[in-house]
Amino acid sequence: MSPRASRSDFGGPCCPRCWRDLDPERVLSGAQSCPHCGGVFEATRFDPPPPRVDVRAVEEAGPDGAASCAAHRGNVAVGNCTRCGVFMCDLCRIETDAKVLCPACFDRLSAEGALPSARTTFRDFGRMGATLLLVGLVFSVLAAPFTLGAVYAGVKELRQRKTLGEGSAVRAWIVIVLGVLGTLGSVAFWVMVAVAGGAK
Amino acid sequence: MKGREKLGRRVAFSHRRYVYATRDCFEIDEIEGYDVTRKRVFYDDVVLVTRHRMVPWAPIVLSGLLSLVGGLTAFGLRGEAHGVAGFTVFVLILALVTLTVLLVAVGGDAITIQGKRTQARMDFVLRRGRAIEVYRRACRLARERQQRIARQAAPRPSGVRA
Amino acid sequence: MACTNHPAVSVGLVRCRRCGQGFCRNCVVALRGQYYCARCKSDQVRDIQSGTEAGVLELATIGRRFGAQTVDGLVFGLVILPFYIFLFLAGGGAAPSDPSVGLTALLTIGTAALVFVYEGLMLSSRGQTLGKMAVGIKVVTPEGQDISAGQAWRRALVRQVFFSYFALVNVLPAFFTKQRTPIHDLAAKTRVVRFRR
């Protein structure tokens, strides 16, 4: 078996030294050695419990009956969606980010990027803003487009912080303030040049 | 602030990866330029946690080269270095050599946290104590969560559990 | 065929996207347009949260794409350099103090044409140029499949049309769109993803 290329070709427990697959049955806790490369490593093995979904049919709920799920008429509803309030059975129920959502709301929120636990890609706007400020510094009086870009990046960082809790508010504000100052400075320079040119 | 605990990191040529522990999962942030890509290993998905010794080649080569360059320079200038400046340079070179020796002797530790879907890797150079601490913490986080789920799934027949 | 959980039900069955077994309407839930049974739905939600969802393109980061461009530029510089030296020598060995507009234009258009052919050929044959191969990225369709020759050549053409300053304009949408598409990617309907052998 050839060694893996890198992280995203992950298909189960592997040797930490040579990346080759390990037979899950053979890996135990304690000092281990890899059958492929002979390397030793210390390991602790876990057996994760399989996910449990408890769907009960309405007919079994008893004589006083129970509310049924909006999407599955035959299943007992076990709760409401936090966002839209619809009744859900355990099959529909998705618990994330301190919320309980129905599949439709989960789809919608994760597509908008509003669920931190479902987000997997981010932009580091704070760092972008800092770089734009440095570039603006290099361009000095022509810095306006870059300092404006830095302000935009700072604002996006603040927004990302509010919706997802990512990034640093302090850095965002520093970037915004410096960006505004830089823009004003370079604009003021050209205004003065224009005024001085007009006064001649 | 997000309130997540930083566990370790692993630096490569074009990107760096940081591993954090949050309430429900280990988060692996890969920072490449201005983009952050995040993967998660949930505590109840953890299958294996490992630790092994590794040779930190990049720091060894770097520190070794610097020692060599410093040593050769010092040797070349051996007649002319006097007083405080000479002494400082000598101390610096000695420090570099010591660092290289330490890196070769002690080396580093690598920790992996393997889940059902993906894995986290961390390197600790010259920090065996921290590596062992992180290893234990990772095992504890996974074990406690998985035991809690197992308890919830199999309620005791005798009634409500205290 | 009958529902895996309810053997009595055999109408209105749906296949679970992950395990492929048949289920009645009460046993499947829809996520992003696909149906999953109870066990697979938990797995799918976990996959989404872990960042390991199957079928989602792993888009290449801007830094990596820029690195690929740099490598390609270096390769090209090394290849083109002998030509410039040849022209220099053929011109009598004296650096022209005032190169004619025609010569400069010829050189620029010639280089652009060469880059166009290079990209068109490499992308239509393997979806990667040398620079892209070096950093581990590849040009694919939005579905993740190999691109057609038409897409490859259109992409290369649009990229060369936006020259010098306009090249920056071309690149700008890549920073602001979710799918990281500069104008030449939008025109050819392509995406650039991480690709490891």
Image (cartoon, helix red, strand yellow):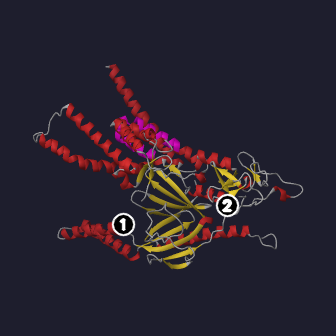
Q: Which residues are magenta?
A: A128-156
Q: Is residue B141 left or right of residue C115?
A: right
| Residue A130, image x, y percentages | 43, 46
Q: Is residue A146 visible?
A: yes
**Quadrant location of the N terminus of chain A?**
bottom left
* Residue tagged 2: C39
| Residue A29, image x, y percentages | 56, 77
Badge 2 vs badge 1, beta-carbon distance below 8 Å:
no
Q: In which quadrant of the rendered view does residue A141 lie? A: top left
Helix, strand, or loop for circle 2?
Answer: helix
Q: In which quadrant of the rendered view does residue A98 lie? A: bottom right
What is the chain letter for disc 1? B
Residue A148 covered by magenta stretch: yes
Q: Is residue B82 visible?
A: no
Amino acid identity at mark 2:
Arg
Amino acid identity at mark 1:
Ala
Q: Is residue C78 left or right of residue C34?
A: left
**Quadrant location of the C terminus of chain A?**
top left
* Residue tagged 1: B58
Helix, strand, or loop for circle 1?
Answer: helix
Question: Could you say which is closer to the camera, residue C40 or residue C47?
Answer: C40
Q: Residue furthest front?
A: C1
